[in-house]
Image (tube, helix red, strand yellow):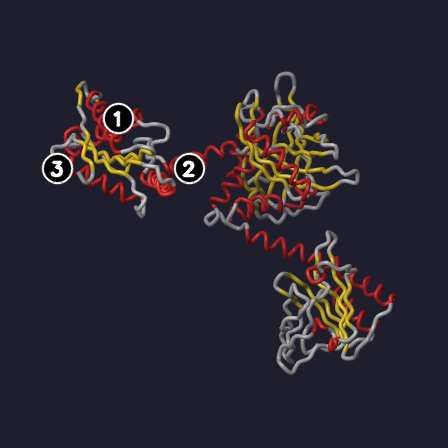
Amino acid sequence: MLVCTDSDKDAVQSAAPAGGDVELPSADTECQAVTRLARAHFGVATAVVTLSNAHGQRLKAVDGVLPDVLPPDLSGPSLQAGTAFDGMVVVPDTWIDERFRGKACGGAARWPRFYTACALTSSDGLHLGALCLLDDMPRALDDAQRQFLRELAGLIAPSLERAHALSTLRDRVKELEAGAELMTLALAGSGTGVWDRNVVTGEIDYSPAWKAMLGYEAHELSNRIEDAYLRLHPDDLADVAAAMQAHFEARTDTYAVEHRIRCKDGGYKWICSRGKVVNRDSEARALRMVGTSTDITALREMAARLQQSIELITNLTDEVPGLVFQYRLMPDGRAFFPYASDGIRDIYELTPQQATTSAETVDALIDARDLAAYRQSIEESAASLSPWHLEYRVQLPRQGLRWRQGDARPQLLADGSTLWHGFITDVTERKHIEAELQESATIDFLTQLPNRRHFMMQSEAALSRVRRVDSCVASVLMFDLDNFKALNDRWGHEVGDYALSHFAALLRAEVRASDIVGRLGGEEFAMVLPDTDIDAAIALARRVQQRTSRTPLLCRAEQIVLTVSVGVDAMRATDVGAYQSLSRGDKAMYRAKERGRNRIEVYGD
């Protein structure tokens, strides 16, 4: 393939030779037509269109004789840094130009003598590639010829921009295939239609997109609700009717149901219908209902492989309606919402009118812990015109503390202000689940103490401090309930679990906020006491023993007195890891058991 790798320096790297079996690219109509026109108009041997990216060039269209090698795209902005550049590079004779001093690929191959490249630029200033003229003889271009070449490049750029946008979108889909953003993109790009139902007259109007989703033309389909029910799959009719009736009677906040519906060709599609009664009479009877239907057939077919993703889609759609908004930041710093949907009543417990005058009404609801980050994220989005995305907390009069997620895209207006179009949704439940998952990964369920993994992580941090600070000390205590197996055998595992939970509570009563305590497994517990020497650690161990013996376990009207054996040692700066001091404490603890139990032993004594 005819390829040349771009360089950020004004030197040309080697390029692959153009062999006789080169497979020409499948150029689109616009590019191929322009190359033919350019070659004929300028009378050169070859006209080519190349695409450029971080990895080099790719041939898009060619007319004429393929050269031995394809020269680099010198019209790229990275090669013109620090120079006045009008998007065109003309090299009358490459043989005497310093930028072509490197060897071409293939050894004997040579560059074309004449080289001209006109940059192809997207509407937002992105460099897409170049329209190049190549010839075997030195040449020059006058101003009129340069202008005509720019006009030809201007004809190609929109086509390449569309192709680039499509390629970028495809790459994005691949990147997000395993995550929630892919589901959001799939939802945004799915076929969705709108319907509007008059509950009193039984009439329902469908948008053209709704009809097209089922294969109907815009003038087809009646607006009778009876005909709508006839299109439902018989197995889904009862569920749909029940869900609709429940919403009419205000037993549900919204109408949402997945069902099958017959298309014009007689086949069935799975759709997700969502709606809401927007008008009720004085007796709360439904008058008008509006909603959407989305084709989810493909998602249903992938249910076995993408069940988790489908659940995410459902969760996302359950949050609709959220807050659709426009947010405008003026050059003088004033901000307001030119538009806010009715969802602002749920998201911020405000009316749309309360946000249109000033954004201060919303700022006042942002949790104090997140207000600075909220304002900074908006400022950064405005400065770089990059998408706004933020998860933040709000304090609402009725709902209390809630989590919100905002997404919006900014644009710069002629008056210097910035306008965002975006959407805000409630993600409180998701944040709670994340917190629960985080807790379950670090806390022992039975004792509510840090589990072994989390305890070891905290212990390693304590050891790091001992290594860094010369005067820093830390002690380690290992605890093991005495005769625990006998207790289990006599009273049963339920009482054994109760004993472990009981002892964990006694440990918590003795530790400071800076102390580290955890359950290592079975009836073994451990403590790391920062800034505590051996004597102080022994004193704490003695208090734990006394508290344990004075606080018997109550079971079936009987008192079970517990005792505990304790091993003590200190962390040492020479320890490879926290496990070494814990191991020494463990050995001391077992020595306490061997010497009669309910004892405290110090390692090495």
Q: Nearer the viewer, mark 3 or mark 1?
A: 3
Quadrant of the image occupied by residue 471: top left
Q: Nearer the viewer, mark 1 or mark 2?
A: 1
Question: Identity of the amino acid at label 2?
Answer: Leu
**Foreground of the two, 390 or 594:** 594
Tell me the crowding category of disc 3: few under 14, some 14 to 19, or many 20 or more residues within 10 angstroms, Cα based: few
Q: Which residue is mark 2?
A: 437
* Up-down relation of residue 187 to residue 563 (above or below): below
Is 591 left, or right, of 259 in this rendering?
A: left
Q: Which mark is residue 594?
A: 3
Tell me the crowding category of disc 1: few under 14, some 14 to 19, or many 20 or more residues within 10 angstroms, Cα based: some
Is 81 left, or right, of 538 in this rendering?
A: right
Q: CA distance from mark 1 to mark 2?
A: 25 Å
Question: Identity of the amino acid at label 1?
Answer: His
Which element is circle 1 on?
helix
Tell me the crowding category of disc 2: few under 14, some 14 to 19, or many 20 or more residues within 10 angstroms, Cα based: few
For the N terminus, the image quarter is bottom right
**Foreground of the two, 297 or 501:** 501
The answer to whether residue 445 shows anywhere in this view is: no
Residue 77 horizontal/vertical position (percent): 71, 59
Quadrant of the image occupied by residue 32: bottom right
